[in-house]
């Protein structure tokens, strides 16, 4: 029995493996050792048989990785759902958006005031923006205070009120996207490890 802890050590004992690195079975050995795994092999002429890890150990590891993959995939799908743009469908049945559009048609002063906010359809899907829109629509005093703030604030003069709120939304989307990328990278790593472990069993 020979204990192997690195690819270099394995190819030193079995140099013919260097010529077969493109073989998926050989690549699996290299990937397993590169990940910190240990092999115990039984030499058989120019080749060998892997006796450790055992099939049972490998199957347990595959099962654990599969459970992790299932969990991560569910999390990834949740995040993708958060990031999916369903604006047209949701807005078509949104009472606040419908009321807003009717008011735009019927009330010229409201239409002019609302234009100064710089709000878009997306704002109707943002909880904080919805509260502002609803109060802006129904409360004339509030509307005048908001318009005054827009006129007087250097922040709102340099960018519209709506752009300021969307900047926060863009930050949230960036965070969601980064989280999704991390989850996808880990899922890809698990897929590669499971493939390597299954190929490793072919050496037994």
Image (cartoon, helix red, strand yellow):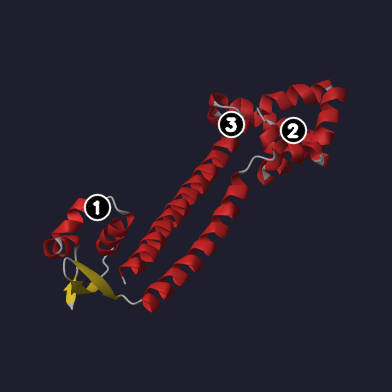
Give whichever of 25, 56 is nearer the camera.
25
Rendering coords of residue 105 (x, y %): 85, 23
Residue at the image position 25 percent from the left and 72 percent from the top: 49
Q: Relative to residue 82, is residue 103 depicted above or below? A: above
Q: Earlier in the sequence, mark 2 or mark 3?
A: 2
Q: Earlier in the sequence, mark 1 or mark 3?
A: 1
Q: Earlier in the sequence, mark 2 or mark 1?
A: 1
* Quadrant (top left/top right/bottom left/bottom right) for the N terminus: bottom left
Give whichever of 25, 32 is nearer the camera.
25
Q: Is 36 left, or right, of 191 in this rendering?
A: left
* Quadrant (top left/top right/bottom left/bottom right) for the C terminus: bottom left
Q: Please identify, in this view, whether the residue under mark 1 or under mark 3 is nearer the observer.
A: 1
Circle 1 — which element?
Answer: loop
Q: Quadrant of residue 144?
A: top right
Residue 139 seen by the camera? no
Between the residue at mark 2 and the residue at mark 3, the CA separation in whole angstroms equals 18 Å
Q: Is 175 left, or right, of 1 in this rendering?
A: right
Rendering coords of residue 140 (x, y %): 80, 33
- In the picture of the structure, the residue carrying the numbered disc 3 is 163
Circle 2 — which element?
Answer: helix
- In the picture of the structure, the residue carrying the numbered disc 2 is 143
- In the picture of the structure, the residue carrying the numbered disc 1 is 21
Between the residue at mark 1 and the residue at mark 3, the CA separation in whole angstroms equals 54 Å
Circle 3 — which element?
Answer: helix
Between the residue at mark 2 and the residue at mark 1, the CA separation in whole angstroms equals 70 Å
Rendering coords of residue 109 (x, y %): 80, 22
Residues at marks 1 and 3 touching, judged by CB atoms closer than 8 Å: no
Rendering coords of residue 23 (x, y %): 29, 53
Residue at the image position 17 percent from the left and 64 percent from the top: 10
Give whichever of 51, 159 is nearer the camera.
51
Residue at the image position 31 percent from the left and 59 percent from the top: 25
Residues at marks 2 and 3 touching, judged by CB atoms closer than 8 Å: no
């Amino acid at each position: 029995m020979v204990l192997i802890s690195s690819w270099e050590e394995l190819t030193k004992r079995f140099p013919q493996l260097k010529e077969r690195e493109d073989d998926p079975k050989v690549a699996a050995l290299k990937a397993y050792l590169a990940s910190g795994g240990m092999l115990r092999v039984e030499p058989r002429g120019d080749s060998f048989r892997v006796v450790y890890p055992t099939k049972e150990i490998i199957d347990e590891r595959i099962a654990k990785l599969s459970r992790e993959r299932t969990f991560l995939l569910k999390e990834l799908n949740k995040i993708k759902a958060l990031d999916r743009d369903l604006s047209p469908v949701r807005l078509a049945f949104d009472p606040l958006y419908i009321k807003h559009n009717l008011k735009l048609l019927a009330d010229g002063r409201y239409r002019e005031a609302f234009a100064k906010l710089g709000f878009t359809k997306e704002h109707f899907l943002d909880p904080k923006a919805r509260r502002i829109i609803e109060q802006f629509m129904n409360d004339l005093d509030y509307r005048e205070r908001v318009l005054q703030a827009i006129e007087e604030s250097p922040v709102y003069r340099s960018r519209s009120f709506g752009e300021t709120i969307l900047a926060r939304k863009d930050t949230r989307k960036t965070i969601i996207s980064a989280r999704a990328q991390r989850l996808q990278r880990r899922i890809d790593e698990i897929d590669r490890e499971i493939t390597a472990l299954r190929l490793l069993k072919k050496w037994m």
